[in-house]
Image: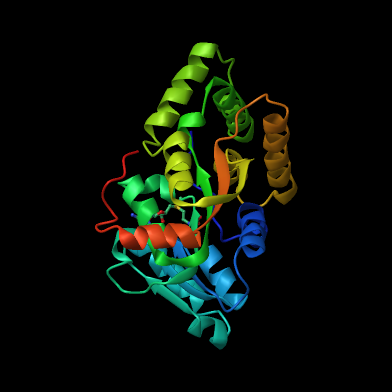
Amino acid sequence: MAHAHASPDDPSLRELLYGDTLRFALAHLPRPGARVLEAGCGRGILALALARRGYEVTGVDPSPEALAFARAASVKLPAPARRRLALLEIPFEEVEREGLAPFDGVIWHRALHHVEKLAPVVAATRRLLRPGGVVVCHEFAPDLFDDRAAAWSLTVEELLGSPRDLRARTLGDVRSFRDDWKRGHPFHGFRAMRSALSRSFEEAHFSWQPYLFTHLVPLLGGKRRELARAIKEWEVVLIESGAIPAVAFRFVGRRSRDQARRASRKSAPSTGFSQ
Ligand SMILES: C[S@@+](CC[C@H](N)C(=O)[O-])C[C@H]1O[C@@H](n2cnc3c(N)ncnc32)[C@H](O)[C@@H]1O
């Protein structure tokens, strides 16, 4: 399977891959002018979009390539948006030490599942927020990729690929595709992420989301916008009908004022959590 993520360079694919998430984040974040951290901002698609809309944005990511891309893209922002944006090549785990808190919102978009130690990272996310601040997550949960999801992904992938590679597939083929896929995504799973988030935040929203299409649209070569959208909608319908599981979710949580008081009474808050 192609593990590449769809390139956000093509504007129509960018809308397909980030448009809904951006609108969702805007609906849950405080008003423009608020301070927002994007943790694991990658190429900065969301971070730049939020700076354009008036947010004071800090994007952090340890990948030099991703950050270089984000910085190059930020040059094209209007000057006021550029001044509202800081891009730092550091892992999330170093943000507290940088003394950048407090934030009004923290966004984790397809990056929380990558971190090494999930529970301390989620606890630090809460500490970085002002009381009343929100965390907005849109996360991939690789452990939910089962035989049904694998059968659909493999079929679409092969239909979009070279006709020369098309051949009849057995359940055994699907399962080895599923296992390869899981080996390629050795990240935190759904339960660990959901329970760490629920422990630290008052839940304001939870929903299942399509995700497999993000692996399939790169096979379109970035040109067939309608087909890309159809694949995404196809995944949504399959999820809604129960034919395949969702392998991504959204969670919005609030740092309650009580939690903030409790946390401030505790010392060494980054330990003492188990997954
Ligand atoms: C799938 S990409 C998502 C990037 C971006 N949020 C987006 O949706 O376009 C995952 C990102 O998480 C970043 N990442 C991995 N570990 C991290 C950590 N400890 N702190 C911050 N970012 C991290 C990777 O460098 C990568 O850019």
Q: How many numbered marks are there?
A: 0
Residue drawn at 58 percent across, 84 percent down: 78
Q: In which quarter of the image is residue 162?
A: top right
Percent across and percent down for residue 49 are 59, 69
Residue drawn at 46 percent across, 47 percent down: 197
- In the rendered structure, the answer to whether residue 95 lies left or right of residue 75 reads left
Percent across and percent down for residue 123 are 37, 53
Ligand 1 rendered quadrant: bottom left
* Residue 245 vertical placement versus 147 (above, below): below
Coloured how? rainbow
Q: In which quarter of the image is the C terminus?
A: top left
Q: In the rendered image, is residue 40 in sight?
A: no
* Residue 163 vertical placement versus 104 (above, below): above
Percent across and percent down for residue 265 are 32, 61
Q: Quadrant of residue 18?
A: bottom right
- In the rendered structure, the answer to whether residue 92 lies left or right of residue 199 reads left
Q: In the rendered image, is residue 129 in sight?
A: yes
Percent across and percent down for residue 48 are 54, 71
Residue drawn at 54 percent across, 87 percent down: 79
Residue drawn at 30 percent across, 57 percent down: 266
Residue farthest along the bottom direction in this orientation:
79
